[in-house]
């Protein structure tokens, strides 16, 4: 049946959707990645961007007289939790699925 | 009068598009089915024509379906969206629903349950885009309550509007109690009636519920309608604005105290006004940080395609912070360090939801 043939053709992959990062990253005070357990398939520049943005959040909180020990950014499908580490940070990346527990 | 709705199907496979067109024109409402093989083309079509429904693939070159849906959600919030994908991954399903899609179907499931799929599409086309309560579109809460009373129902109506939850207890067609945000009785009922949209569900009746409302439902509805009319007509407001502002501040402080929060700062976007705060002296500094944090997080979310920002939390030894974006504003809610972190999100949402109400 033409319908089935056309359906099966669909599964020939020609393009990809970006997977979300999972794992942990350590960045130094300059935003350079020191260690990472995130899959090497995930673009390094995006990991770097996450690290830099997290450091900016910590830095600006300090400037606002509210130094923070930990920051979590909750997106619909990803949670980024970062702990301050002597000017740098250790960052945990948790993709959120329908089966993930509600973030707090 | 019947209107012919338009469906836009986006997929990079032209054969699939032909097949979809063949299938969807056969729907009972005979929609006008249009197709686009690239995200750019689809967005251009959405700009120039009015569509009721977008059916979108996920895996596409250059701009993938999630990116398209993120754009569509912002630029065409009234457009119904369906993801029809071959990706059998729970993560993508979650991300699609997080972007507000109405339906996520696997192409294989569409083949297996084609009847159900077509029913779903037809139902989405048939939905009225107007406001109202989910399940009974275009009906106000007054209509729903009247329907329950006329049918002499005994039930508990649970009404949800974002993070706010209200309950109405009805016994043999009479309203016996109402509860919302800590208020009970007629006060709560009037507050609930002001809600313009939300979702509701019927829970089992609770005949033993203590009666706090003795007025007839018609009298209550009439009073509430009059109050709402007066509120909408500014010329009938002889009291000073200052007085109203004072009353609002007291009410907000009471909310803050009741929930146990230390402070709240409402921060409009850059150039749209000054932060407004209760409970803190560091309005400018914390307001600036809140604005920056929300901006950085939103941009980061777009960059890593993680879906919309839900909230940001932070803590140190002295306090816990919660940043919540809401419309054009971001809110920063400060909590004591010993507040139960598991409930802070819900409590913060409640505070923020009632801040502007």
Image: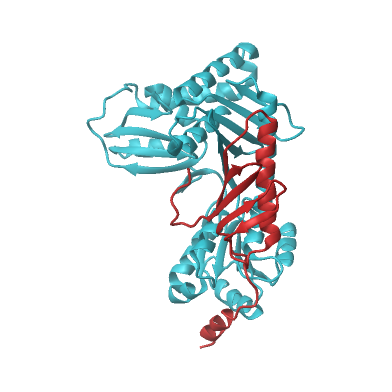
Q: Nearer the viewer, residue B7 or B258?
A: B258
Q: Residue at point 52% right, 36% down?
A: B196
In this view of the protein, which residue sits in the foreground, A54 or B124? A54
User: In cyan, which chain?
Assistant: B
Residue at 68 percent of width and 61 percent of height: A44
State which quarter of the image contains the N terminus of chain B. bottom right
Say which residue appears at 47% left-offset and 68% top-offset: B117
In the displayed structure, B46 sits above or below B167; it is below
Q: In the picture, residue B210 is in which quadrant?
A: top left
Quadrant of the rendering where the C terminus of chain B is positioned: top right
| Residue in front for this viewpoint, B161 or B46 | B161
Is B16 placed above or below B345 here? Answer: below
Q: Position of residue B291 (x, y in %)?
A: 68, 36
Chain with colour red in the figure: A
Q: What's the image's color scheme?
A: by chain
Front one among A13 and B10: A13
* Residue B76 appears in the figure: no
Place of residue B142 in the rendered image (x, y in percent of width and height, measured from the top left): 44, 34
Q: Position of residue B342 (x, y in %)?
A: 43, 39
Q: Tell which residue pokes out farthest to the left in this image.
A: B208
Q: Image quadrant of residue A12?
A: bottom right
Q: Is residue A95 left or right of residue A58?
A: left
| Residue A58 visible here | yes
Residue B223 in picture, x, y percent from top left: 45, 22
Query: Number of labelled discs?
Result: 0
Residue at the extreme right of the image, as rendered:
B271
Please identify the residue farthest to the bottom as the structure is shown: A1
């Amino acid at each position: 049946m033409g319908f089935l043939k056309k359906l099966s053709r669909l599964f020939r992959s020609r393009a990809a959707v970006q997977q979300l990062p999972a794992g942990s990253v350590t960045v130094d005070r300059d935003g350079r990645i020191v260690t990472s357990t995130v899959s090497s398939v995930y673009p390094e520049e995006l990991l770097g961007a996450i690290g830099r943005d997290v450091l900016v959040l910590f830095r600006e909180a300090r400037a606002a007289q509210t130094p923070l020990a930990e920051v979590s950014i909750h997106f619909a499908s990803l949670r980024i939790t970062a702990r301050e580490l002597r000017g740098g940070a250790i960052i945990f990346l948790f993709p959120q699925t329908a089966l993930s527990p509600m973030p707090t | 009068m019947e209107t012919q709705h338009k469906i836009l199907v986006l997929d990079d496979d032209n054969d699939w598009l032909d097949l979809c067109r063949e299938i969807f024109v056969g729907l009972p409402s005979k929609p006008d089915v249009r197709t686009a093989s690239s995200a750019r083309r689809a967005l251009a079509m959405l700009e120039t024509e009015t569509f009721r429904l977008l059916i979108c693939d996920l895996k596409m070159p250059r701009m993938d379906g999630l990116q398209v849906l993120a754009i569509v959600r912002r630029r065409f919030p009234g457009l119904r969206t369906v993801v029809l994908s071959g990706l059998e991954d729970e993560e993508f399903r979650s991300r699609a629903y997080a972007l507000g899609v109405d339906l996520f179907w696997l192409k294989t499931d569409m083949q297996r349950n084609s009847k159900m799929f077509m029913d779903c599409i037809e139902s989405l086309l048939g939905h009225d885009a107007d406001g109202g309560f989910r399940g009974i579109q275009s009906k106000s809460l007054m209509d729903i309550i009247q329907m329950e009373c006329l049918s002499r129902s005994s039930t508990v109506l649970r009404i949800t509007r974002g993070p706010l939850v209200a309950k109405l207890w009805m016994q043999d067609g009479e309203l016996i109690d109402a509860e919302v945000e800590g208020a009970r009785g007629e006060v709560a009922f009037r507050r609930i009636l002001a809600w313009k949209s939300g979702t509701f569900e019927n829970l089992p009746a609770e005949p033993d519920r203590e009666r706090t409302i003795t007025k007839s439902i018609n009298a209550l509805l009439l009073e509430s309608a009059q109050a709402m009319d007066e509120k909408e007509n500014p010329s009938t407001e002889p009291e000073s604005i200052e007085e109203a502002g004072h009353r609002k501040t007291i009410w907000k402080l009471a909310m803050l105290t009741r929930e146990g929060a230390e402070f709240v700062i409402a921060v409009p976007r850059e150039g749209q006004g000054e932060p407004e705060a209760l409970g803190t002296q560091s309005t400018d500094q914390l307001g600036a940080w809140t604005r920056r944090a929300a901006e950085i997080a939103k941009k980061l979310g777009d960059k890593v395609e993680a879906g919309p920002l839900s909230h940001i939390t932070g803590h140190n030894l002295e306090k816990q912070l919660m940043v919540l974006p809401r419309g054009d504003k971001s809110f920063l809610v400060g909590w004591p360090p010993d507040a139960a972190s598991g409930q802070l999100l819900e409590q913060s949402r409640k505070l923020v939801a009632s801040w502007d109400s």
